Amino acid sequence: MLGSYNIHTDLALEDKERYESDDVEISGVSVEEFYDEKHEIRVTEVKIITENGAKAMRKPIGTYITMEMANLVQAEEEYNKEIARKLAKYVGDILQMEKEEYTALVVGLGNRNVTPDALGPHTVDCLNVTRHIVKEYGKYAMGEEPCQMVSAIAPGVMAQTGMETYEIIKGIVETVSPDVVFVIDALAARNTKRLNRTIQIADTGIHPGSGVGNHRNEISKETLGIPVVAIGVPTVVSADVIVRDTMENLISVLEDDDKYEVIQDLIAPHLYGMFVTPKDIDESIDRIGATIADGLNLLFTQSV
């Protein structure tokens, strides 16, 4: 059904849902779901185990943990603290760092001047970086033990720097020698209900710009030689998705086999390159970036 549209989504959960809607099981993919009724947080863990599963899901082999929140942007402070605690826990689970003390590089991907794409830079702005303090005064200056050395950068985009993001990160990794890289990025979703309400954590790294058809070199363990944990939030959805969903409601009386052909023919071609974001995106980026930074700060101090 939806698979015939070739709709892009950065969320592994939504790729899995494409097959579930057609009652198709995917070999090499496992799914577990958890629901925190008190805080209304649904957690779905999608594991792509085989190459067959990776091909079907259009995602690399690895683990993808998706947190869906009923209210992430307008929530009370205590609720956001709970989200940060859960984020720290799941990032720790997916990282599985054996060393008690390690060095981390946090990379905020995206264009600071384009609000829907500014999640990474804003998260870095809210992060507690410690590498310079530990290098200058020793780990006991932080007053915590164990103490992680954390450095961060918002490298911008190729149009601003003239360099691939991968090239910048690769150079920093070779100089700083971190044990792990965390990349924060804005994603594209298939479902408008998931915009600014969903956080995906993955151990597969990231492909900058893939959500809007702007493919760049991947940032992953394979390319950097160290673990890469990606944390992303969908902030945009393709305009043609909104049109399709609306048309489905309007022509729901048609037979399934005819319905989707009609929708495909009626969508204006220019809509395939247009992306839409909620009108309160400024506030959303501020709140979500701060929440992700709080979660990472908790992880680095092991205050989970």
Image (cartoon, rainbow, N blue to C red):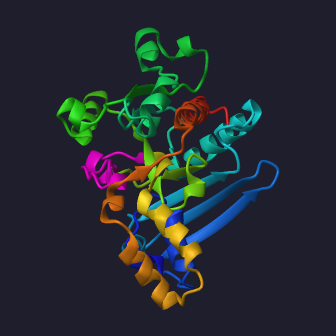
Total number of numbered discs in the rendering: 0
Q: Hey, which residue is sitting farthest left in the picture?
A: 162
Q: Residue at 45% x, 62% y: name it.
A: 62
Is residue 225 placed above or below 283 in the rendered structure?
below
Residue 125 image offset from top left, x and y in percent: 47, 24
Q: Is residue 117 visible?
A: yes
Q: Is 107 or 282 nearer to us in this picture?
A: 282
Q: Is 187 or 237 nearer to us in this picture?
A: 237
Quadrant of residue 292 within the rendered picture = top right
Q: Residue at 74% x, 38% y: name it.
A: 79
Is residue 244 placed above or below 104 in the rendered structure?
below
Q: Is residue 211 magenta?
A: yes
Quadrant of residue 162 within the rendered picture = top left
Quadrant of residue 58 within the rendered picture = bottom left
Residue 179 image offset from top left, x and y in percent: 39, 38
Q: Residue at 51% x, 25% y: name it.
A: 127
Q: Is residue 166 magenta?
A: no
Residue 57 image offset from top left, x and y in percent: 43, 71
Q: Hey, which residue is sitting farthest right in the picture?
A: 38
Is residue 142 placed above or below 302 in the rendered structure?
above
Residue 39 image offset from top left, x and y in percent: 78, 48
Per the rendered image, the range of residues in magenta is 208-229
Q: Residue at 67% x, 39% y: name it.
A: 85
Position of 127 compared to 68: left or right? left
